[in-house]
Amino acid sequence: MDQLRLNALDAEDLAVLSAHTQDAVARAGDLTLDTRARRFLVPVNRFVWEKTPPRRWFGGTAEHERRRSVLRFDRVLAARRVGIDPASPDEILSLLALRWIEGEAPSGTIELVFAGEAAIRLDIECIEVQLTDLGPAWTTASQPNHRV
């Protein structure tokens, strides 16, 4: 079984989830805030960085993987967004990082930073986040490339 199921209960754990979800893509209309359950769900197609083959410098293309996954944020008190148009549910968002902004312990804010100057801020009671792979991987020839 090579599917991930990771939990984050502190800032260090959240950094691990951030690394595993870098370059995940999500459809804006699929993001769900359940105020009654105090939960925020982010279904994504996650790039499988942990299985990336070594770079091929001289020719050839490597096969990479993506997986359907979900990020679940619990104990959410409030959510705000910037740069995401609620009238465009088919907009594709590319997740760059999960950031922790400490508040009065154990509360704080988790910021989901997306490409194109978009972000979501979740005010939370404490860090309680889960990343779960939902099914088999599929191959892709393209690998995200970040140029400085």
Image: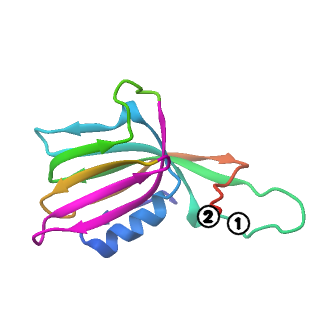
Q: Are marks 1 and 2 in contact (CB under 8 Å)?
A: yes
| Residue 109: mark in rendering | none
Direction from residue 146 to residue 96 in the image, left or right: left
Q: Quadrant of residue 28?
A: top left
Percent position of residue 48, x then y: 56, 57
Percent position of residue 138, x then y: 62, 45
Q: Which residues are magenta?
A: 91-116
Q: Measured along the vertical axis of the image, is residue 57 above or below residue 114?
A: below
- Residue receiving disc 1: 53
Q: Residues within 10 Å of mark 2 (few under 14, many from 20)?
A: few
Spatial CA span between label 1 and label 2: 6 Å
Percent position of residue 37, x then y: 13, 42
Q: Measured along the vertical axis of the image, is residue 132 above or below residue 18?
A: above
Q: How many marks?
A: 2
Direction from residue 75 to residue 138 in the image, left or right: right
Direction from residue 26 to residue 35 in the image, left or right: left
Q: Is residue 25 magenta?
A: no
Secondary structure under the numbered disc 1 in the rendered image: loop
Does residue 6 show up? no
- Residue receiving disc 2: 51
